[in-house]
Image (cartoon, rainbow, N blue to C red):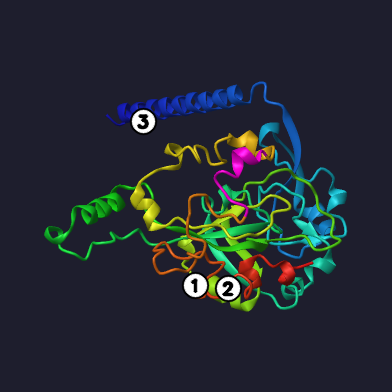
Amino acid sequence: MTSRRTLILIAAIAIGTVASYVLWSYIQGVKDDLNEGAQQADVFMVITDIPEGTRGEDAQRTSIEVRQIPNNIKPANAVTDLAQITGKVALSNMVTNEILKVGDFIDPSVKQTSFSDLLPEGMVTASINIDRVRAAGGFLAPGDEVNMMVVGEPWEQPFGSIPDDELTEEQRRDNNAVGGTPYQAPGRWFYQKVKILAIEDRLAPRAGEEVVDTGVTVTGGGIITIAAPPDAILRIMSVPSSAIVFTLLPDGYEAKVWNNLTLDEVIEDILPGEDENYLTPYGPGGYNAFIDGDTEGASIAFGEDGRQIGDTSSDNIGDDDNRAGGNTGGGTDNPFGGTETDDPAVAGDDSGEEE
């Protein structure tokens, strides 16, 4: 009986070994199929952890080796020559299997610079943890300027406090319109041309510093540090980060007052695509007309002052009847402070920005 059990055990081990080999062979075959025809590229890879502040020469001797990876996953900013890190130090801790990238090692004098030295006089910082969707899809970079939008609480029915049996037909229609509109919450422009100083641990380039063009990088959002005067930072930090949306700006953008969506417009329930004065986000002429500066196609929707055509109120900013809230750039009753000329950060006066 003992001999029989031994034979059964040996057979089971043999079957298990064969099964393991077959599975391993299958996995290797799949990997080979995936890599077949894929062009390989050399990269410098971290093979042992590199502590922050390590000299480039020391890292080369003990912690970096050349490895091959599929070319289609090679980072655009991968280091191509170890001379690029000679005489420099590690910006932050690097972990095993990390690919060496431009910017991972920096000049020691830059490393020793205090973060506060990067701030222009009169500025302070604030950091906002914002996800990729609300951070311009993750296409932000340190040094960019953005417009900051805040999204408020959902619209309230204008006559919601009145019992339904006491409502007039018009009041009931207005309540139903608010409940059925696609505009579920008011968005407002909070500040324009906000300067991004850093994203996570990546700093904006300083004046005179060489900038390496690595193409478009998707950051995925994260901790975004902005620089602004203290009074502006106080207002920004009074807003929940979950309500903040950043919009990326083109070069040469000039801040101006843009009109807000009002509750009256929501109640009217006419969407831009149903209005011949709008039709597209760029005016009736469409995207190309807008890009080409076709005023017939673009200015129909927006006047020279940025207010939407059809808004008959020239001074409704901050007005009590504008339940969406006045534009943050003006109105003496503006709860976010300042008038169009009193607050440079709101009105678009660049006098307080970094030269």
Point 74% across, 33% down: residue: 41
Q: Is residue 237 left or right of residue 118?
A: left
Determine the secondary structure under disc 3: helix
Point 11% across, 58% down: residue: 165
Q: Position of residue 100 (x, y in %)?
A: 74, 49
Over which residues does the magenta segment extend? 294-304
Q: Position of residue 259 (x, y in %)?
A: 52, 57
Label 3 or label 1, whichever comes before in sequence order: 3
Residue 146 seen anywhere in this rendered image of the structure: yes
Mark 3–mark 2 CB contact (< 8 Å): no
Give the vertical position of 238 relative to 157 (above or below). below
Label 2 amino acid?
Answer: Thr
Label 1 amino acid?
Answer: Asn
Label 3 amino acid?
Answer: Leu
Give the vertical position of 298 relative to 122 (above or below). above
Determine the secondary structure under disc 1: loop
Label 3 or label 2, whichever comes before in sequence order: 3
Q: Residue 162 lies in what quarter of the image?
A: bottom left
Point 38% across, 57% down: residue: 263
Mark pair 3, 2: CA separation? 87 Å
Quick one: 9 or 107, which is closer to the camera?
A: 107
Mark pair 3, 1: CA separation? 83 Å
> Which residue is label 1 attached to?
334
Q: Residue 284 lies in what quarter of the image?
A: top right
Q: Is residue 160 magenta?
A: no
Residue 201 seen anywhere in this rendered image of the structure: no
- Tell me the tag on residue 9: 3
Q: Is residue 298 magenta?
A: yes
Which of the image's four quarters has the C terminus?
bottom right
